[in-house]
Amino acid sequence: MITVSTEATATAGILERLADEGVSIWLDDLSRRRIESGNLAELIETKNVVGVTTNPSIFQAAIGSGEGYEEQLADLAVRGVTVDEAVRMMTTADVRAAADILRPVYDATDGRDGRVSIEVDPRLAHHTAATIAEARQLAWLVDRPNVMIKIPATKAGLPAITEVIGQGISVNVTLIFSLERYREVMDAYLAGLEKAAAKGLDLSVIHSVASFFVSRVDSEIDKRLTGIGTEQALALKGKAALANARLAYEAYEEVFGGDRWTALAGAKANKQRPLWASTGVKDPAYKSTLYVDELVAPGTVNTMPEATLNATADHGEITGDTVTGGYAQARADLAAVEALGISYDEVVTQLEEEGVAKFEVAWQDLLDAVKKSLGSKGADAE
C-alpha cells in the first residue's frame, strides 16, 4: 500500500479542483521503469492521474534507452523475431501492464477513465485498410477492455475511425489541429456508433476521445507573428492555440447537443470527449500551466507530460470554466491573426503533416535502436 505524504496531499488539492471541474487528468508518458518502480501507481494515488497516453516519441525515449527491457530483448533475440514484432511485443506489454494498474479506475468510472492509449504504426497514417487491420491487431494483442487505439486524424484515418468504432473498439483520435478536421472526426465517430448499433453492439462500452493539439499551434503562429514584428502582431502571441481549442469545444457542444447525437444517446452511447494534447508549453516566457489553467471545461481530458502535471500541482490556478465564455474572443483572436496575413488553413495543414512526419521519424529511430539491441543480444546468446 502506498503511503501518501503530507506534501503530496497538499499539492494534490489543485489537481483535485481540476478534476472537480470535470477535467480528467491523464499522463502523457509511459515506460517499463515507470510501471515496475511503482511510479505510475503512485501518480494515480497522489496526483489524480486517471489515464495514460503514449505515442511513438514516448516509446522511442523509453525503449530506446533499453532500461528495463533487457530481459525481454534477450528473449526476443533468441527467438529471432523481426524488429517490428519485437517493438510491438514490448510496447503492448507496457500498455497491458499499465491497463492492469489503471483497471480499478476503469471499473470505478464505468469505463470513462482508467484508459491507456497505444498508437497504430505511424507509417500507416495515410493507409485506411492497413490502419484498420493494425487497430484490430493492437486491440487483440493488448487484450484489455480499457485500452484505446490511437488513430491519426488524417484523411485516410477518418474512415478507419468509423470502421474501428463500428467494430466496438474504443479509439483515441490523435493529431487534430484544425476545427474543420475536428468536425470530420466527430462525424466519423458518430458514423461508427451508428454502424455498431446496426450490428447490435452495446454502445455503452465504446468510448472515444479526440486529441486536439494545443502548444504546437502557438509555436508555429508565434514564430510567424515574431517575423512580422509589429506591436499588433506581438500582442497576439500566445493567443491562437487557446482560441483554437476553445472553438473546438464550442463545436463539441454543438455536435453533441444535436439531433443525431440524441438518438445515439438514447442507446446509451458515450460522447467523444475533447482531449487537450501537447499541453506542455514550448515557450519559456509562458506560464508552465498555461494550457491547463486556460482550458478548464466539463467533460474534457488533459493529457500532461509529468513536468506539466507537477507544475499544475504546485502552482496551477484553477478558477472554474475558462473555456465556454470565451468563444467570441477566440474568434476575434483568430481573425486578427488572419488579418495579418497568417493563413490558418496553411498552418494547421503544415502542423498535421509535421506531426505525422515526427512520429514516423521517432518510430524509425525506435526500430533502429531495437534492431541494434537484438543484434547484440543475439550475438551474446551464441
Image (cartoon, rainbow, N blue to C red):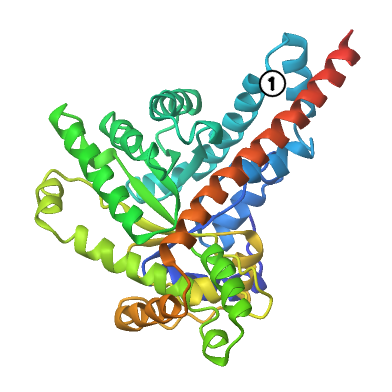
Task: Determine whether, in the image, residue 170 is placed left or right of residue 350.
Answer: left
Task: Determine whether, in the image, residue 322 is placed left or right of residue 315.
Answer: left
Task: Determine whether, in the image, residue 117 is placed left or right of residue 136.
Answer: right
Task: Determine whether, in the image, residue 187 is placed left or right of residue 140.
Answer: left
On the image, the x and y values in percent for residue 245 come to 40, 68
Q: Amino acid at mark 1?
A: Val
Q: Looking at the image, which is closer to me, 170 or 313?
A: 170
Quarter of the image holding residue 375?
top right
Residue found 36% across the figure and 76% down from its top: 323
On the image, the x and y values in percent for residue 25 come to 48, 60
Residue found 35% across the figure and 51% down from its top: 109
Does residue 1 appear anywhere in the picture? Answer: no
When the figure is inspected, residue 7 is found, relative to residue 350, above or below; the finding is below
When the figure is inspected, residue 45 is found, relative to residue 151, above or below; the finding is below
On the image, the x and y values in percent for residue 67 come to 79, 38
- Callout 1 secondary element: helix
Quarter of the image holding residue 57?
top right
Does residue 79 appear anywhere in the picture? Answer: yes
Residue found 30% across the figure and 51% down from its top: 272
When the figure is inspected, residue 191 is found, relative to residue 140, above or below; the finding is below
Residue found 23% across the figure and 42% down from its top: 204
- Kindly give the residue lying farthest to the top in the view shown: 382
Q: Looking at the image, which is closer to me, 37 or 249?
A: 249
- Kindly give the residue lying farthest to the front in the view shown: 341
On the image, the x and y values in percent for residue 54 come to 56, 45
Assign the C terminus to one quadrant of the image.
top right
Q: Which residue is mark 1?
A: 83
Q: Looking at the image, which is closer to me, 197 or 120?
A: 120
